[in-house]
């Protein structure tokens, strides 16, 4: 069976969920070979093997932390040349898409970004995407070179499938451009204790109807009762009620959770573009004619300040 390269997104050896999803998808089209780079790379092997990696290629060097994406592209290209894979899969983060694009240019291959599903085809992997603000679903495949595909978080359920996970050192020679852009400082992101927005299985978002920054505590309360991430519409962000890093929509982040709860959000096309691929969508809005109701699986017509606290208390009581 052909091998499939999977780029590993990890933090000091702790593998992030989108990578485990990639391993699940990679098994549909071949045998996953993981590429882990940077500090703690060797510590990823156990988790990767548990989820299907037959081999783990590792390499650590100061360049991965000190410079931007080019060193990682150099390493992924080295892995590509060593393995000759049937496809290369990369998580669809901002950095992941840049790495994938640069690799595709280098190896003369086509690229598909933001895939939401992947299946084997007679002429190569077939990727499913949501296009035109999620108004259409398309299926496509790469017609030139080795497919390079980035996959959105929450596109597949994580499935354990123990494999050998043999660890091998990857030989990497950095190009002259690898040290062209240096990282001069880093500021750690403040932890809220909630899941990362783009990776969360449940997202609770608030919009213009929340009517103020202080009122977002109602949205946060529901999110915390569900172990969810908190999102916001552009209107709420532009008003300064919630940070831009939590914006969901065409000019914000794209999410695809198992459950998306929209509170006080009208459902403009720009917002829908960022959450329309959610598996189950629930809306709470006092305007029965709000466009969001055309999209949802379940809708509640009512004042969010009455509905959301009751929902939060019900969830807490059931958990108790």
Image: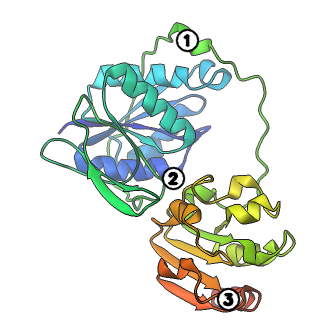
Along the line of sight, the residue nearer the viewer: 171 or 137: 137
Query: Does residue 270 appear to the left or right of 4 in the view shown?
Result: right
First in residue order: circle 2 vs circle 3: 2
Along the line of sight, the residue nearer the viewer: 83 or 104: 104
Along the line of sight, the residue nearer the viewer: 296 or 48: 296
Report the mark closest to the observer, 3 or 1. 3
Q: Which corner quadrant holds the C terminus?
A: bottom right
Q: Quadrant of residue 179?
A: top right
Q: Quadrant of residue 104?
A: top left
Residue 281 x %, y %:
51, 76
Label annotation for residue 186: none
First in residue order: circle 3 vs circle 1: 1
Q: Could you classify mark 1 by the number of other residues whose Cα lies within 10 Å: few (under 14), some (14-19), or many (20 or more)? A: few
Gap between marks 3 and 1, in whole Å?
Answer: 55 Å
Which residue does the numbered mark 2 point to in the structure image? 17
Q: Could you classify mark 3 by the number of other residues whose Cα lies within 10 Å: few (under 14), some (14-19), or many (20 or more)? A: some
Which residue does the numbered mark 1 point to in the structure image? 177
Circle 3 SS class: loop
Query: Does residue 292 appear to the left or right of 140 in the view shown?
Result: right
Could one spot residue 318 in this view of the protein? yes
Residue 86 x %, y %:
24, 34
Relative height, residue 173 to residue 307 (above, below): above
Label annotation for residue 286: 3
First in residue order: circle 2 vs circle 1: 2
Query: Does residue 184 appear to the left or right of 110 in the view shown?
Result: right
Circle 2 SS class: helix
Asked whether the beta carbons under mark 2 and mark 3 sit within 8 Å of each other, the answer is: no
């Amino acid at each position: 069976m052909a091998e499939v390269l999977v780029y590993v997104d990890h933090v000091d050896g702790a593998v992030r969920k989108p990578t485990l999803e990639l391993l699940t998808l990679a098994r549909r089209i071949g045998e996953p070979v993981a590429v882990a780079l940077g500090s703690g790379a060797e510590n990823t092997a156990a988790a990767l093997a548990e989820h299907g990696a037959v081999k783990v290629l590792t390499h650590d060097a100061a360049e991965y932390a000190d410079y931007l994406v080019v060193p990682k592209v150099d390493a992924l290209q080295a892995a590509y040349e060593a393995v000759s894979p049937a496809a290369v899969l990369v998580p669809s983060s901002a950095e992941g898409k840049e790495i994938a694009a640069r690799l595709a240019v280098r190896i003369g291959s086509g690229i598909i970004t933001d895939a939401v599903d992947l299946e084997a085809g007679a002429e190569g992997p077939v990727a499913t995407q949501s296009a035109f603000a999620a108004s259409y679903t398309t299926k496509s495949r790469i017609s030139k070179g080795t497919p390079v595909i980035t996959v959105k978080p929450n596109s597949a359920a994580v499935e354990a499938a123990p494999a050998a996970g043999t660890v091998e050192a990857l030989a990497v020679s950095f190009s002259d451009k690898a040290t062209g852009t240096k990282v001069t400082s880093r500021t750690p992101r403040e932890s809220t204790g909630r899941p990362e927005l783009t990776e969360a299985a449940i997202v609770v978002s608030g919009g213009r109807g929340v009517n103020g920054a202080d009122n977002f505590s109602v949205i946060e309360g529901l999110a915390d009762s569900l172990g969810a991430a908190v999102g916001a519409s552009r209107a709420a962000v532009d008003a300064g009620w919630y940070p831009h890093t939590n914006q969901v929509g065409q000019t914000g982040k794209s999410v695809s959770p198992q459950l998306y709860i929209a509170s006080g959000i009208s459902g403009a096309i720009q917002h829908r573009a960022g959450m329309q691929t959610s598996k189950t969508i629930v809306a709470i809005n006092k305007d029965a004619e709000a466009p969001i109701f055309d999209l949802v699986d379940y809708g509640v017509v009512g004042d969010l300040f009455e509905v959301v606290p009751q929902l939060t208390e019900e969830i807490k009581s059931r958990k108790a």
